[in-house]
Image (cartoon, rainbow, N blue to C red):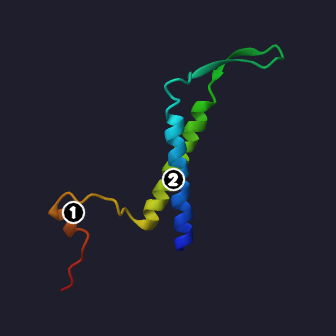
Amino acid sequence: MAADEKKVLREQLELMANRLLEEGKKIEIEDIVIMYDNGGGQSGIRENPFYPAYEKLLAAYTKTLTVYKDIVGNADADIRSLESIRSRFKVAK
């Protein structure tokens, strides 16, 4: 993947992450179900459209993040032990 494509993907991840943080703050105040009245004599309770929209954004972010990590590797991975360091290198004989 070209550097420009990686940059675009990274920027999209940042946009989605910011939006998830913004919308995530609303979860505490959003009702799971809401009342509706379509004006044609139909009214009742339905699923709040906030939740499916949030779930779709979260799923898109997760898929994009997975693709991004597959492309660029997990450069932010913690090295927790000597064995984890050894597993990153091949020794030539």
Pointer 1 residue: 84
The relative height of residue 18 versus residue 8 in the rendered view (above or below) is: above
Q: Along the horizontal axis of the image, is 24 left or right of 35?
A: left
| Residue depicted at x 52% and y 72% | 3
| Residue depicted at x 49% and y 59% | 67
Disc 1 or 2, which lies upstream in sequence? Answer: 2
Quarter holding residue 73: bottom left
Residue 10 in percent (x, y) is at 51, 60
Query: Are there few (<14), some (14-19), or many (20+) residues within 10 Å of tag 2?
Result: some
Residues at circles 1 and 2 in contact by the CB criterion of under 8 Å: no
The relative height of residue 87 versus residue 17 in the rendered view (above or below) is: below
| Residue depicted at x 20% and y 57% | 80
Image quadrant containing the C terminus: bottom left
Element class at badge 2: helix
The numbered dot on residue 18 is none
Pointer 2 residue: 14
Query: Are there few (<14), some (14-19), or many (20+) residues within 10 Å of tag 1?
Result: few
Q: Along the horizontal axis of the image, is 22 left or right of 47?
A: left
